[in-house]
Image (spheres, rainbow, N blue to C red):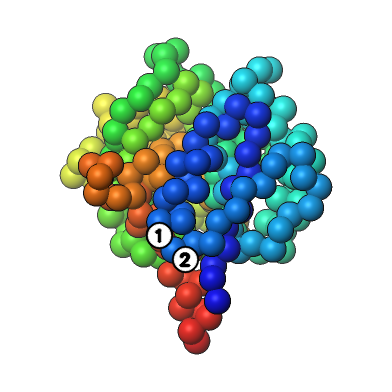
Amino acid sequence: MPVKAGIVTFPGSNCDDDLLRSLSGLGYEVEKIWHKDSNLPKVDLVCLPGGFSYGDYLRSGAIARFSPVMKEVVRHAGRGGLVLGICNGFQILTECHLLEGALLRNENMQFICASVYIRCENSDTPFTRSLSLGQVLKIPIAHGDGRYYAPMDTLKALEDKGQIVFRYCTADGNITPESNPNGSLLNIAGICNRSKNVLGMMPHPERAWVDYLGNEDGRWILESPLKQALNLLNG
């Protein structure tokens, strides 16, 4: 029985095909979902890809959250379905309040495109069970609004509840100001909700999943829900 993934495409999405190729290549059955669809197909994983939904006008992700399909994405998450938001998808997840906090303009006020290191802070989520706690991955970023911000009480709650999933780090796993590419508070690169079924992250694992891309670290993240689902199906 195939594990099914749906990729929502908004006007301005530009990483949806990258995500489709990576998920298909890893063994998912994948279909695209248009943002105006009012019904969500039966899928195990919903993905919100990177890009510039609605041109990032007003605020990144602020308009996309009102697309008809997002009501169904929220319902899917509420039923315990898996949701992965990458880059602009992370921004959309904060705008529709599936995740806490906000993504602000990079501290240096410039668009950043580079490979960075991130450390796994919670290996007990559907997206990280293939990882070990503290494992370091090299994953590309490409964003202008990636600086994670939340009030101090929210940050404390995220930390206390194990919702900080990835932090920017050095190649050897140290969390330092210099390893933080955009000024995110607490070096946050990705967080999940309290139920751990919704993950938002700024780095792009779909750009690092196969050897011809020069890096396969992203497959640790993308394959994790697939392996978990197959294990459950196989008993």
Q: Is residue 30 above or below residue 206?
A: below
Q: Nearer the viewer, mark 2 or mark 1?
A: 1
CA neighbours of label 2 inside 10 A, class few (<14), some (14 to 19), many (20+): many
Residue 52 or residue 75, whichever sits in front: 52
Lateral position of residue 38 relative to residue 35, left or right? right
Q: Amino acid at mark 2?
A: Leu
Given the current orientation, which residue lies at the most extreme top position? Answer: 109
Cα–Cα span, label 2 and label 1: 8 Å
Disc 2, SS: helix
The residue under label 1 is which amino acid type?
A: Leu
- Give the residue pinned by disc 2: 226
Of labels 2 and 1, earlier in sequence is 1
Q: Residue drawn 55% across and 76% down?
A: 1
Q: Position of residue 45 (x, y in %)?
A: 58, 58
Q: Position of residue 67 (x, y in %)?
A: 76, 36
Residue 136 visible here: no
Q: Which residue is mark 1?
A: 26
Question: As rendered, which of 224 and 179 lies closer to the eye?
Answer: 224
The reply to whether the C-beta atoms of the residues labelled 2 and 1 are less than 8 Å apart is: yes
- Asked whether, in this view, residue 38 is left or right of residue 156, the answer is right
Q: Position of residue 130 (x, y in %)?
A: 36, 64
Residue 206 percent location from the top left of the image: 41, 45
